[in-house]
Image (cartoon, rainbow, N blue to C red):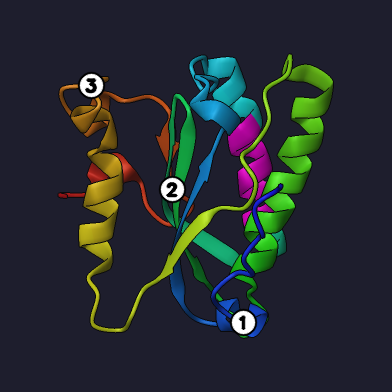
Amino acid sequence: MLPIERPHRLERDDYEGFLCCTFTCCIENRKNFFVTPEIFSIFESKLRHVLEKNHCGAHVYLFMPDHLHILAEGKSEEADLWKMIVDFKQQTGYWLSKNGNGIRWQKDFYDHILREEEDVTKHMAYILDNPIRAGLARDWRDYLYKGSTLYNLHELEI
């Protein structure tokens, strides 16, 4: 018997407008995939495209070998963070079906909408420290597979 799929906990319109949200998207079975500059470049380009298309900006995005973290925010009333992440997974899922040698996204994603009192900088630091906690880098600045559409990360004091 298949498990019953639970609906997403928030309403669709909860992701619209001026707000910040973290997303984590995992590769199915946690297979390592984001391990080359070429793969990172392809996925970064698609992410930047859907962010712009959906009126969103990324405080930070970071591709770990088997998952992706994004801290994004809506930049206008028309911003739609849900559509942004769904568009990204659809576009990259199609690319994976043609080029990924059996690699697929895990169904759905994890998210957290930041409350007004939550510190965006703390969330950025947590995301950027992922490679350190995983033993992939000694300093987040040395980790290659990251970026932002809102800042030059290397100029930030986090």
| Cα–Cα gap, marks 3 and 2 | 19 Å
Of the residues shown, which amino acid type is indicated by label 3? Ala
Of the residues shown, which amino acid type is indicated by label 2? Ser
Q: Secondary structure at mark 3?
A: loop
In the rendered structure, the answer to whether residue 38 lies left or right of residue 144 reads: right
Q: Which residues are magenta?
A: 43-51
Q: Against 7, is 85 above or below?
A: above
Q: Front-most of 52 and 87?
A: 87
Of the residues shown, which amino acid type is indicated by label 1? Glu
Residue 130: percent from left, percent from top? 27, 37
**Nearest-to-viewer mark from 3 and 2:** 3
| Residue beneath disc 2 | 148
Q: Residue at x 28, y 54 (%)?
A: 124
Residue 11 got which mark?
A: 1
Task: Check residue 12 for magenta coloring.
Answer: no
**Nearest-to-viewer mark from 2 and 1:** 1
Q: Identify the image quadrant of residue 100.
A: top right
Q: Front-most of 74 and 3?
A: 3
| Residue beneath disc 3 | 137
